[in-house]
Image (tube, helix red, strand yellow):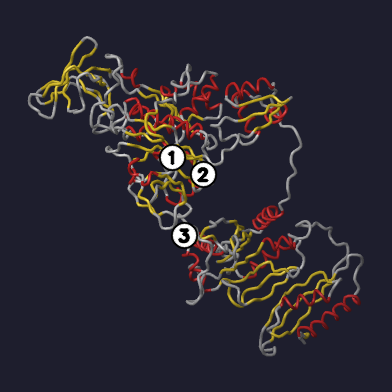
Amino acid sequence: MKVSLKWLSEYVDVAVPAKQLAHRLTMAGTEVGGIEERGNGWPGIIVAQIESIDPHPTACSLTLVGLGLSGERMTVVSGATNLNVGDRVPFAPVGAGLIDAQTGRPTVVEVAQIQGVTSRGVLCSEKELGLSEAHEGVLILPSEAEVGLSLNAVLGDTILDLEVTPNRPDCLGMLGVAREVAAIMEEPLHLPDLTYQEEGSDVRDDVQVEILAPDLCPRYSASVIHGITVGPSPSWVQRRLTAAGVRPINNVVDITNYVMLEYGQPLHAFDYDTIHGRRIAVRRATDGESLRTLDGTLRTLTPGMLVIADATRPVALAGIMGGSETEVTELTKSVLIESANFSSGSIRQSCRALRLRTEASFRFDKGLPPAITTLALRRATKLLVEICGGKASRGLQDVFPAPREAIEFRLTAVELRRVLGIDLTLAHIRDVLAGRLGFDCREDGSALMVRAPAHRSDIQIPADLVEEVARMVGYDQIPTTTLAGRLPDHPPQPMRVLIERLSDMLVGCGLQEVMTYSLIGRRLLGKMVVGKDAETPTGLRLANPMTPDQEILRTSLLPSFLECLNNNIREDEAGPRLFEIGRVYLPRQADLHEERQMLVIGMAGIRWQRQWSRATAQLDFYDLKGVVEELFDRMNLGETRFVQIMDQHPFHPGRTTAVYSKDVRLGVMGELHPVVARNFEVRFPVCLAEFDLEQLLSVIGGEFLQIVPPPRFPAMRRDLALVVPERVPVSELCEVIRYAGRPLLHRVELFDLFRGEDLAPEHKSCGIGLIFRSPDHTLTDAEVAQVEACIIQQLQRLTGARLRG
């Protein structure tokens, strides 16, 4: 919001320098982002009066303009066609600085020979003064501008660039800013006069207004002015619009923009004679309706959009932009002025759907108060009568189906001290709220009952009143105190603790953490496909993706993780050992996608860099399994089972296991399918593990790592050489041994695996070490032999294993 101090001074006396005012506004919560001194770039430019206009002796397109300059006369050559005798214009004599209209760069005026005539100065356009891009003619100054006075004294201004917060839509208008300044500086506020002569017919005979969507339009007001003349606006209106960054168009449109900047309430002017049936209906658009807006674009409307319609068609997008068929033109003789209040949510949705943002929609989507609609309408009608001529119809059409009574809040000095930490008397609080900010206050014992003024739609709860008092006292004046009171309890976050500890443990195992984007593209998903008939996995797609590679919420960490793994293989000869913890987004029928925390561990390539002292070897499944087992041991997970599975995409069939603990499936681990590996251009076998952290959290008991004292009694070891059918996995043998060897069996380990001609076909020999230990005594050979016999018996019965001879 650009605020002209010259314009602002009409409503409130500003007796302090601009920098001090900016500081006071900022300390009161309305930040001033910048200060522009307009006029500092006009050194030497003065006001001159045109006394004569004569034709150039040799150039028909030029004129000789005689200027009066405080007792002296000068003649300059000009090509402008908008000059008249008596006009007061900005004159840049030789040596004065201005902006070159051709290059846009600063320049200094020099003596010029133009078609044989010497010209010792320049009559300046708005572009040469840096006011706008207009260069069609010379800027005509107000008739009251004193001849010989510096242009800076006439047009110079200071512009404050306010960064208005979304909760203060009242400060999007000059009057709102003036109220802030008046409250801060404790100066009186001068409001515009809203009275005007009503000479036309009754407005109820001119137009009928009906609100068919009161939930989207709480209030709609309109006035009609007949017999106007459309033309350029007065210079003072144009200057103020230009200072605010708005381009002047014509007097009718300029007045609606002027009042919008003054009150913060957007308005729209219709050519009254183009309104069919003299009827205005505020309604939702119907399916298939369209409207050509003022920017010339034909827009297709949807039923959720709010439109302003006449008897037959939409004529405007409510709160956004008018239609071209009812646009005010030079031929317009009567106008209908609209001032309404619209639902901020409706405006935002329509703007987003149409990809259309305007100054009006910017204000409406902040939530304007309905009370200012008639005030802004009266102001606009008054200016139209005074500037454009014509006659205003009697009265206003004001449809307000459900007025809301202002909320009354209770505020005490105790509450204010609790929030701000300062002591203020009730009288002081009342002086701030009622005397300076215009709130309605009444005392109720030890409390104030407060109602906010109509223009303050941001006051919604009692804490907002405390904020108002703090703003007026000054945030920089509130003393700093130490916080007191009991800190709130920290809620337990077991998943966060699990993630942090997992990361630490995996880094301790020699892995590096990676982080990839939650959004992936179809290119990566296509690489996960095995076979021509397989379907590409899909997920929730973004409506407006930034790039094709980031358009779908991932349902697995694997696609982007594998790409990262491959990139690391290319960079380092030693195989990368990586892990990632992140969310995946799993689809659910008729519901939002489910977010789940997952862990992926991956490794590929050679086990270590080439060395002369040892042979190279590739990382394999058992390197990965060692990391997983170490992780589970540190998490105190207890016994885990590895069960071979055949159909887990995108893992290799027959080289993949599901991991269980307490009959809960934690995840899978194994080798990546070779087709997927080729798709990612990975030259080595890739070993992966993928775990669901929610399932993992459900089976963790107590502390992650338990510290126990070293055993007091020695262990006894027995080795078994078992011949078993090839189809029996070693994990099944170990599970049977653990169950049969309780409670004396301490550990089971596979130390040898043999296949050869000495064995029966489809059989293998497994060397398994059994370590026995008792926590309370030294074991005897008889005790161990008894348990060992039980183990052998169970192995023979359940797996068909026999001792190798």
Circle count: 3
Observer-nearest of 42 and 346:
346
- Tell me if label 1 and label 2 are in contact, CB under 8 Å: no
Q: Decide: is 120 above or below 264.
A: above
Amino acid type indicated by mark 3: Asp
Q: Nearer the viewer, residue 273 or 750?
A: 273
Mark 1 falls on what kind of element? helix
Q: Identity of the amino acid at label 2?
A: Ser
Give the residue at mark 1.
Answer: 360
Whole-angstrom CA distance, mark 3 to mark 1, is: 37 Å
Residue found at the far left of this picture = 58
**Quadrant of the image containing the C terminus:** bottom right
- Spatial distance from mark 3 to mark 2, Cα to Cα? 37 Å
Residue underneath mark 3: 549
Estimate the x, y position of residue 319 in percent, counting from the top left. Answer: 44, 43
Residue at image x 56%, y 26%? 27
- Which of the image's four quarters has the N terminus? top left
Where in the figure is residue 538, as x and y percent of width and height? 52, 66
How crowded pointer 3 is (Cα within 10 Å; few <14, some 14-19, many 20+) is rated as some
Q: Mark 2 highlights which residue? A: 343
Q: What percent of the width, then of the height, locates residue 269?
A: 37, 38
Measured as percent of width and height from the top left, residue 363 is found at 47, 38
